[in-house]
Amino acid sequence: MTTTLPARPVIETPRPVPTAPRRRKPRAYKIFRVVALTLTVLLFIAPLVWMFIASLKTNVDIYDASKTVFFTPTLDNYDNVLSRNNYFGFIFNSFWVALLSTLFSLLIGVPAAYAMSRFAMHRSALVVLMARIIPGVSLLVPWYFIFANMRMVGGFGVLILSHMFVALPLIVYIMISYFDSTPLELEEQAQVDGLTHIGAFLRITLPLSVPGLATAGILSFIFSWNNFMFALVLSGANTKTLPVAIFNFVSYASIDWGSLMAAAVVVTVPIMVIALFTQKYIVSGLTAGATKG
Amino acid sequence: MTTMVTTKPSMWKNYSTWANRHRKWLFASPAMIFVGLLIAVPLGWTLYLSVTDSEGSVRAASNLVGFSNYLEVLTDTERFWPAVMRTFVFTGGALAIELVLGMCIALLLWRPFRGEKWVRVAILLPLVATPVAVGMMWRLIFDPNIGFANQVLSWIGIPAQPWLSGQYTALPTLMFVDIWQWTPMVVLMLLAGLTSLSDEPDEAARIDGANSWQRFWFVTLPLMRATVIVTIVLRGIDALKTFDILYATKGKGGGSFHEVETLNIYAFGLSFDYNDYGIASTVLILFFLLIIAIMWVLTYRRKANRS
């Protein structure tokens, strides 16, 4: 496993400039490329658009094949989801759990990643990365009973702990690759100037690592926001997160498709907006370790 | 150390010196203890439960039954082995298609072009979408009566398909959903690998008269070996553990015929629907060993190939 440890983050990799003028591609290839790319984009976007359209339809319209494209949009589904089903509460729960689990994970994950990078602690890194490999279900039964004994099930604490378990390996993985690529010289310089090792880390390396921290933080927030299984078992009536709330929507006899799609839009849109504005960071985090040669 | 030695070092200075000397473990241990506690204790407990006949409640009295659970599970051809098979079919099938499709799209995106940014955004969206919401979305699209999928089929004259509700179509349909959501991940990883390649080998092959297919197969692909393996490992682990879209679309037990019941779904059901902790723990230990074995083979082979 140690071999999958990332060597350097992609964020710093500049797009190589072609050294020689490229041979002109035939026109047929250009057309093929445009068509293929358009199809690709359509394939990935169309279902999401469909979900959004359905969320604006009444259930009668959803069942009516003649109204696939032309219909009178309505916001009733959103009204139903947000005001009558208390989705603002679920949004708050999801946000709170994601925020706190991300902050705590950064707090303990970043120094750990720093030490693991500087001291080449490959085996220790493997321990943390184990959390990413192990199937979550195998921990859930013991967790459930241990935390039930401590009267924590149904509270925010246990949810945050379980989401940290997802966030921590991610943060450590991304930050190790980031610290590996940060030069040692600046820290050594700072020590010559009288800073201690820890002082150099806090005042020199950490401020220089803001892009890496942003990458790790954003991804860990997204993973926590999207997490379903841990919340399904460990959340209570007052701490239910959005994915669990959406899942509960269909456990009744008939499915209210319009509202279900509105709920699905409510959970995905915030994440997609974050993704649009932080695209560069997300990509560099997801591909950390991809270019190890 | 540049700390000046004074005759009366302050308390703070003592702490500071100590902290700096032990910074390696001071920094690393909180995270390691956190993960260690959350893994070691539960895993030990799961290991213990797997040799007991624990049922109903973990606190209820249970007896040590030795390896009889393992014997029972390993000879269970009704639920366990089909679940193993489905896990492999789902993971292997989805992963293979994601790799091929992902490589094609990555190659299309490789060279800069106008509007590149928008294509990248489009590809990123499925990747960050909440899996449960994605499951619900496809559930509507693949609904046999009102879904858009059958509507499209009817336009081109193909009879309606049962999709998610069919005994034999549910698993392939969910593989499609997995492919839709995670091919972008493969694209991004392969693209990162492609952009880090130097142009020279490709140019040299071009000068030697190699066509584009030959250049891809004999030059680019071998150079991408490491990236491809990292992609397979990362995506493979997640695919083996797929839970959200399966549970969100088919619910408990993977449908009425257990048609999408993978190992993860099976173990979850045993644990939280049937409270059959002994058997559940056995299945989980076997599942865990399976994942470790696959990982070991992938990374071991990689090392062997390198030397």
Image: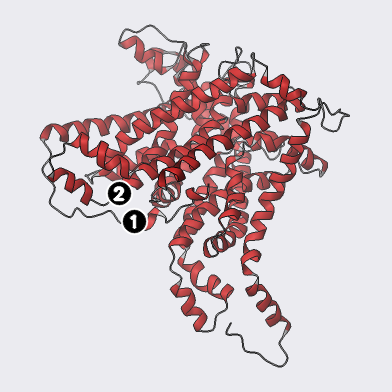
Quadrant in the rendering for residue A239 = top right
Residue B239 drawn at (x, y percent)? 51, 32
Q: Which mark is residue A69?
A: none
Q: Amino acid at mark 1?
A: Thr
- Point out the residue furthest to the right here: B61
* Left or right of A260 on screen, residue B77: right
User: Of residues B41 and A286, which is closer to you in this image?
Assistant: B41
- Name the quarter where the N terminus of chain B is drawn: bottom right
Residue B201 visible somewhere in the drawing: yes
Q: Is residue B33 above or below residue A254?
A: below
Q: Secondary structure at mark 2?
A: helix
Is circle 1 on the same chain as circle 2?
no
Chain ID, mark 2: B
Q: Amino acid at mark 2?
A: Thr
Residue B127 drawn at (x, y percent)? 44, 38
Q: Residues within 10 Å of mark 1 (few under 14, many from 20)?
A: few
Q: Which mark is residue B195?
A: 2
Residue A145 drawn at (x, y percent)? 78, 37
Q: Residues within 10 Å of mark 2 (few under 14, many from 20)?
A: some
Q: Secondary structure at mark 1?
A: loop
Looking at the rendered structure, the number of numbered marks drawn on it comes to 2
Separation of residues labelled 1 and 2 (CA atoms):
8 Å
User: Of residues B219 and A213, which is closer to you in this image?
Assistant: B219
Q: Which mark is residue A13?
A: 1
Residue B222 drawn at (x, y percent)? 31, 41
* Left or right of B157 on screen, residue B44: right
Quadrant in the rendering for residue B208 = top left
Residue A154 visible somewhere in the drawing: no
* Left or right of A32 on screen, residue B227: right
Label 1 close to label 2 by CB (< 8 Å) = yes
* Left or right of A180 on screen, residue A84: right
